[in-house]
Image: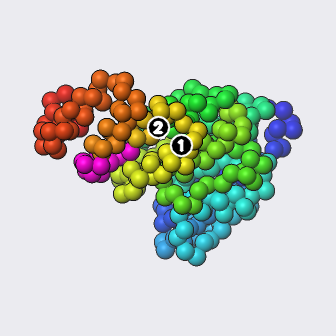
Amino acid sequence: MDKLRAMTLVSVVIPTYNRAQMVKRAIQSALAQTHAAIEVLVIDDGSTDETVAAVGSIPDSRVSCLRQESNRGHAAARNSGIAASSGDYVAFLDSDDEWVPGKLELQLSSIGECGVSVSGRRTVDDSGRVVKVTRQLVSGDIWDSTIGLEWVPATSTLLVRRDLLEHELFDEQLNALVDLDLVIRLAQRSCFSGVEEPLATIHSHSGQRVRSPDNAPELWLMLLEKYRALMSPRNRSAFHYRAFLTAYELDRFAFARTQLWNSLRLDPRGAKRWMRLSSMMLGPRVHRRAQVLVGRR
């Protein structure tokens, strides 16, 4: 990396809520970056545990903790971090995730004229076993692949030029899908640089990542309405299908069946989706037995 780039300040925004036992791991992975010109902004979103003390126990002047008195949600916490940041770029790191040491350096060296860099990621379970590796294969003008849900980002992989965030912030009306919503808007403003390697580790633990929020299906439909004017029928079909999947996960069978039908009505391709709809028309019990017989839920 050239000397000028090595001096580029990156603001690392880490929102956290009652994760005193996890947040130190995230902070330490930021401090271990080979790109040393960073500031780490931990946004304590009204925690009631020892989060503030845990952050304060790290003896590094690059780390600061901003406390919000009430729990306002991760979108608001990230926006507070952006407002307090002073870097040329802002990187986001969830408090239960971590980075490999070269993440920021690799992203900065490859971002070029683009305003956003996104990397691959690996997902690990409670025991540290890698359960999934997602390589970042999109770059350049990613609008079509983003609005078509060909990939869904993870916040901990994003590096964003700060001036873009003066126009686009996280939507505080959403309690999930905030990363996708932001990336959709950023993709309208800038090209993306993709780093294929998995530079972020996403921890899939026994907490909130296991089950979608109860309103997840409605959130997919909310995004559909938000961007409907920009979508093709095939795009809308993809959002209805995501609403179906989350509703099914939440055992909201009737709602899921409606969303699956809406998806197929807009884009009738896909034999497996028609088979799922056919078995769902016979009711939950028959459908679940059919899914077991074909090796699916």
- Please say if 51 is above or below 220: below
Residue 24 versus residue 290 in the image, above or below: below
Q: What residue type is labelled 2?
A: Arg
| Residue contact at pointers 1 and 2, CB within 8 angstroms | yes
Q: In this view, does 186 lie to the left or right of 137?
A: right
Q: Residues in magenta? A: 243-255
Position of the C terminus by quadrant:
top left
Q: Say which mark, if any, is on residue 236.
A: 2
Q: Is the magenta stretch mostly helix, strand or loop?
A: helix
Between 284 and 114, the residue placed more toward the observer is 284
Q: Where is residue 69 in the image (x, y as percent from the top left)?
A: 58, 76
Q: Residues within 10 Å of mark 2 (few under 14, many from 20)?
A: many
Q: Can residue 122 be seen in this view?
A: no
The residue where tag 1 is placed is 228
Please tell me which residue lies in front, 16 or 129: 16
Label 1 secondary element: helix
Give the x, y percent position of residue 241: 38, 38
Which of marks 2 and 1 precedes in the sequence?
A: 1
The quarter of the picture where residue 53 lies is bottom right
- Magenta residue check for 246: yes
Q: In which quarter of the image is residue 33?
A: top right
Q: Work out whether residue 280 or residue 290 is closer to the camera in this orientation and state it.
A: 280
